[in-house]
């Protein structure tokens, strides 16, 4: 594996931590029971394992275990939140507010609701990627039923001011949903202090397995109603039917437990690696930092490079590092990233961009190799351009 490029795409996904895998393994084989089986030990031990993860997730965000609904990931959690609220509250109002830089798993359900007659306000972001709270206040109406603003952006790592947004929503009796797929385990989260009513989570960005996530749904002060989007055996208090995937759930719990225990030291370490990368890269002229310089995830650096072709840059970096570039999150799409254009970047700058996602298993030596290669690639592309 040593001749493979250095993995620096931790916003796309992360490897499963060995400790997480070890915790999961028994639940594939000897402890294979269905947590819904109430008549025997196979079911009880699976149910106990699921309960433990519920407790870990609840503690991680200051919720209660009954407020955690397991899903297949954050895409499903976002769909359940947005469509589930629209369906449960449409008689109260049919207006929803979200943001231009949200993940497609929020924007597309909103687009779908628009086709059903809902009105959607999509707030712009400022140059640093943060929303303007005054604009949010102005957008709120008596018929607004939901505000959905992500915790941490998957391309530029920007952290939105959740507590301020939560207060604005609570004062107006509007439900507040946040997509915390990139944030769980990485920054402190508190659904009480931040007045969050719904929060989407996923395991695979935090060294847990893919295909498992959760939606936090507030049960008290106020109780949030949610219309299920998947019907069946009535699992998860009727909000999401389907046999629970015990091994993945166990892995999710273990992953979050480890991330919380290591959060402070890991944040400091990643910040240092990111700062050293940016400090060296920014010696070059014409490099733009995308997103707020400090109000961002520790492992995220997103840059645009003036004077180079986006595709050539991507090709030049590929042998040495696995990073995302151009349209980071929908690489099948050849349009420039809508997140980067929302910040006011030109199409050229949005194309010629690199998202570094530094994670748990990256070392200072790797960052050194990456820095040197990125600088050499950019210099060589610029030189070629002036020769043409
Ligand atoms: C911000 C954000 N929301 C939602 C998702 C989707 O999560 P999942 O892959 O668990 O469906 C992702 C990951 O791609 C993400 O980065
Ligand atoms: S990081 Fe989630 S889709 Fe790109």
Image (cartoon, rainbow, N blue to C red):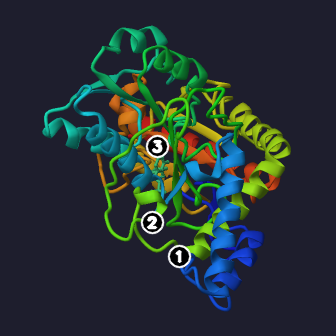
Residue corresponding to mark 1: 36
Image quarter where the C terminus lies is top left
Image quarter where the N terminus lies is bottom right
Answer left or right for 283 relative to 212.
Answer: right
Residue 228 place in picture, x, y as percent: 34, 53
Query: Is residue 84 shown to the viewer in this render?
Result: yes
Q: Is residue 286 above or below residue 303?
A: above
Q: Nearer the viewer, mark 3 or mark 2?
A: 2
Q: Is residue 231 above or below residue 140?
A: below
Residue corresponding to mark 3: 384
Query: Do the residues bearing badges 1 and 2 touch, measured as CB atoms within 8 Å?
Result: yes
Query: Do the residues bearing badges 1 and 3 touch, measured as CB atoms within 8 Å?
Result: no
Query: Is residue 98 shown to the viewer in this render?
Result: no
Residue drawn at (37%, 21%) of the image: 124
Mark 1 falls on what kind of element? loop
Residue 331 falls in image quadrant: bottom left
Mark 3 falls on what kind of element? helix
Of the two numbered discs 3 and 2 on the same chain, state the one appearing first in sequence: 2
Separation of residues labelled 1 and 2 (CA atoms) = 8 Å
> Which residue is at the front of the view, 128 or 319?
128
Residue corresponding to mark 2: 235
> Which residue is at the front of the view, 210 or 269?
210
Separation of residues labelled 1 and 3 (CA atoms) = 63 Å
Of the two numbered discs 1 and 3 on the same chain, state the one appearing first in sequence: 1
């Amino acid at each position: 594996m040593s001749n493979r490029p250095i993995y620096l795409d931790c916003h796309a996904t992360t490897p499963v931590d060995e400790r997480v895998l070890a915790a999961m393994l028994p639940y594939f084989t000897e402890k294979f029971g269905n947590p819904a089986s109430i008549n025997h030990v196979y079911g009880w031990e699976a149910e106990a394992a699921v309960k433990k993860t519920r407790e870990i997730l609840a503690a991680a965000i200051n919720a209660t275990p009954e407020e955690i609904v397991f899903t297949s990931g954050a895409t499903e959690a976002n769909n359940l939140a947005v469509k589930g609220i629209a369906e449960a509250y449409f008689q109260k109002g049919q207006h929803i507010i979200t943001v231009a830089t949200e993940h497609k798993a929020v924007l597309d359900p909103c687009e779908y609701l628009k086709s059903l007659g809902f009105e959607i306000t999509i707030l712009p972001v400022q140059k640093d990627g943060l929303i303007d709270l005054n604009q949010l206040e102005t957008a709120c109406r008596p018929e607004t039923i939901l505000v959905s603003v992500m915790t941490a952006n998957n391309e530029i790592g920007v952290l939105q001011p959740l507590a301020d947004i939560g207060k604005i929503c609570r004062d107006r009796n509007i439900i507040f949903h946040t997509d915390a797929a990139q944030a769980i385990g990485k920054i402190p989260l508190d659904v009480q202090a931040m007045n969050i009513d719904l929060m989407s989570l996923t395991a695979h960005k935090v060294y847990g397995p893919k295909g498992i996530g959760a939606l936090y749904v507030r049960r008290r002060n106020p109780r949030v109603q949610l219309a299920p989007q998947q019907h069946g055996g009535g699992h998860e208090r009727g909000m999401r039917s389907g046999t629970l995937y015990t091994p993945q759930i166990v892995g999710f719990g273990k992953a979050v437990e480890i991330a919380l225990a290591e959060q402070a030291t890991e944040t400091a370490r990643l910040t240092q690696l990111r700062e050293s990368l940016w400090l060296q890269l920014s010696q070059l002229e014409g490099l733009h930092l995308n997103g707020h310089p400090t109000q961002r995830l520790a492992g995220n650096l997103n840059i645009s490079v003036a004077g180079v072709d986006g595709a050539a840059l991507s090709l030049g970096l590929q042998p040495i590092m696995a990073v995302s570039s151009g349209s980071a999150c929908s690489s099948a799409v050849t349009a420039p990233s809508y997140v980067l254009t929302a910040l006011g970047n030109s199409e050229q700058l949005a194309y010629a961009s690199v998202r570094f996602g530094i994670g748990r298993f990256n070392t200072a030596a790797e960052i050194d190799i990456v820095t040197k290669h990125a600088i050499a690639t950019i210099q060589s592309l610029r030189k070629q351009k002036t020769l043409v």
